[in-house]
Image (cartoon, rainbow, N blue to C red):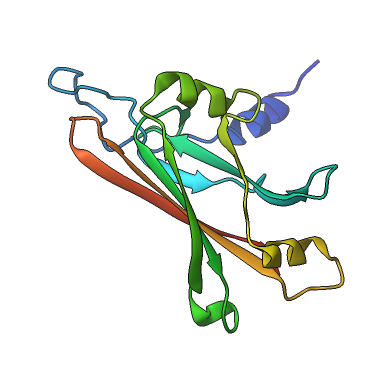
Amino acid sequence: MISAAAVMSALGACAVRPPPPMAGQRAVGVSSPFAPASLSIHPLTRVDRDASGVVWIICHVELRDAWGDPCKGTGKLQIQLYKPVGGRASGLGSQELAWDIDLSDLDKNASFYDPPTRTYRFPLQNAPAWVADVLDPANREARVRLRAVLTTTGPKGEERFLQDEYTIGG
């Protein structure tokens, strides 16, 4: 028999989400209520080497709507690669490379989406040789910094910029 204390304890663990910015609004005049409201570079992001020795950056980008739920989105995504200079607090570093991805092409958009992780998975090729330094466990100072910027459309049709930064290694 389940005690009342056990039930109350289990219910206490359930979190109540705060209302989203659009709470109480009707969809009238809103072109896309579930448009992305935030972007984050997911911790699944990593540097990897394939069987032929080519180094890849596998970047996972997660979009969330105003309710905090994972969602898909359209627009222009740019993933920027920075080579760190100085210590951890020295800023992004120097930009070395950028990959432009058009998520407005719905077929291409769908091909990048990874349903099990609910993220977009971008295999980024042609990374500079120094990126492979993070694969060496003895090199604790090696870092790769990424910045993702999505130019998309907000719920009311307005242009919106979503961005995040992420460091691999170090």
Does residue 26 lie above or below 11 as drawn?
above
Does residue 40 lie above or below 147 as drawn?
above
The residue lying at 39 percent from left, 38 percent from top is 18
The residue lying at 55 percent from left, 23 percent from top is 111
Given residues 6 and 156, the one toward you in this image is 156
- Quarter assignment of residue 128: bottom right
| Quarter of the image that includes the C terminus | bottom right
* Residue 169 visible in image: no
Judged from this view, the residue extending furthest toward the bottom is: 86
Question: How far from the left and from the top, in percent, is residue 47?
Answer: 71, 53
Given residues 63 and 142, the one toward you in this image is 142
Number of numbered markers: 0
Given residues 27 and 48, the one toward you in this image is 48
Question: How far from the left and from the top, in percent, is residue 146?
Answer: 54, 58
| Quarter of the image that includes the N terminus | top right
Does residue 65 lie above or below 96 as drawn?
above
